[in-house]
Amino acid sequence: MNESQGRFTKRGVDYPIIDGMRTLPGRYYHSRDIYAEEVEKIFYKFWLFGLRAEQIPEIGDYQLVQIEDESIIVLRQKEDVFKAFFNVCRHRGTKLCTEPKGRFDQNLIQCPYHAWTYRLDGRLQSAPLMKEGHGFEKAKCSLHEAHVYNWDGFLFLNLDRNPEPFEVRMEALVNKFREWEMSKLRIAHHIRYELNCNWKLILQNYQECYHCPGVHPLLSQWTPVHSAQHDYSKGAVIGGFMDLTRERGSMTMDGSAAGPPVGCVGGEDLQRIYYYSVFPNLLLTPHPDFVMYHHIIPQGPGKIINDCYWLFHPDTIKDSKSQEGIRSAVEFWDLTNRQDWQVCEQMQQGTKSKRFTRGYYSGREDVLLTLDHEVLKALGHTIEDGDD
């Protein structure tokens, strides 16, 4: 490690030395005004993870994705083509779909109020008793469309009219985990957690292991804290890895693999667990033998839904001999998750105190400072050292 002028270089990457650098003020976890800004400037403008492609498996299948006040219909239009529409009829604004998921009869979307009917590509097919003219044109009454991008089976949405292209915003992610062949993996298990904490605290907790020895004794046996490396720290994609102590091990209750390696994973990746934050609402954890991810859904400044999923290869899911390994992986991460949720909720409570102004980061929390900067940049805010 080479230290000079307040910076150090590790594995060819230049990092700031941040011992003693300050956290966000407490109001960033509690203020309704700041949260309203985050909704408008982050959740309504950035690429967000919505759902897995496998959750709408057939042409005409749909699932609703709620992003604050906006309900989005995500559907499979063709075998490999997905569409996303605002759940609003162009007639008088009626909500088209009320069931969280389903299938469109005859591949048509029909308003339940006045029967305006749309094709799966969003074009208006029929509007009963309406005649073109006097300002009404069917061609101008297609459903309002949101942007959708399929990355390895993860469907990302963007509600902005002219978003930054996914390939630009998520450049570091696009080819990062190709060997895992994640589009071929399937959901083996799902747990929904409802937490009383701010969405940013979950992202921060995920990207540091400073807390691991005291909070996660079992995790610290399988992946030593000193092995943590950040291999990418820029913009929307931030992440790194930790080494496994057991050869061909994994993150399970006994540290053994839950199944065979997925995709074409090999070499050093057989001994690593990756932890990647895809700002602002996806936490991605590729293991050699499975992939776990968290879908973060803010419910206000002090509440979130965290949907946690475990992905395995379909053959592993079908194999009766693999069920114990899958259960062990789920049990391990459920235990670890609940340990994290407890301290995150305690932090939410503590940062509400009038005596809490701003905290101090250690040198092991450099990525958290990067996350803070991403939030501040999106909001157009600046925090001065004396701003408590």
Image: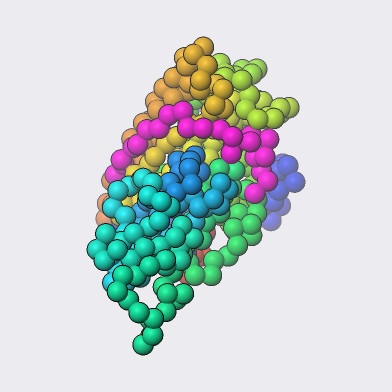
Compared with residue 273, is residue 281 higher up or lower down, i.e. above or below?
below
Residue 279 is situated, as x and y percent measured from the top left of the image, at 51, 52
Residue at 41 percent across and 22 percent down: it is 331
Q: Is residue 183 visible?
A: yes
Identify the magenta region: 174-199
Residue furthest left in the image? 113
Q: Is residue 347 visible?
A: no
332 and 147: which is toward the camera: 147
Q: How many marks?
A: 0
193 and 377: which is toward the camera: 193
Residue 342 is situated, as x and y percent measured from the top left of the image, at 33, 35
Residue at 68 percent across and 35 percent down: it is 179
Q: Is residue 188 left or right of residue 178?
A: left
Compared with residue 238, is residue 191 higher up or lower down, i.e. above or below?
above
Residue at 38 percent across and 67 percent down: it is 126
48 and 254: which is toward the camera: 48
Which quadrant would the C terminus be assigned to in this image? bottom left
111 and 212: which is toward the camera: 111
Q: Is residue 300 magenta?
A: no
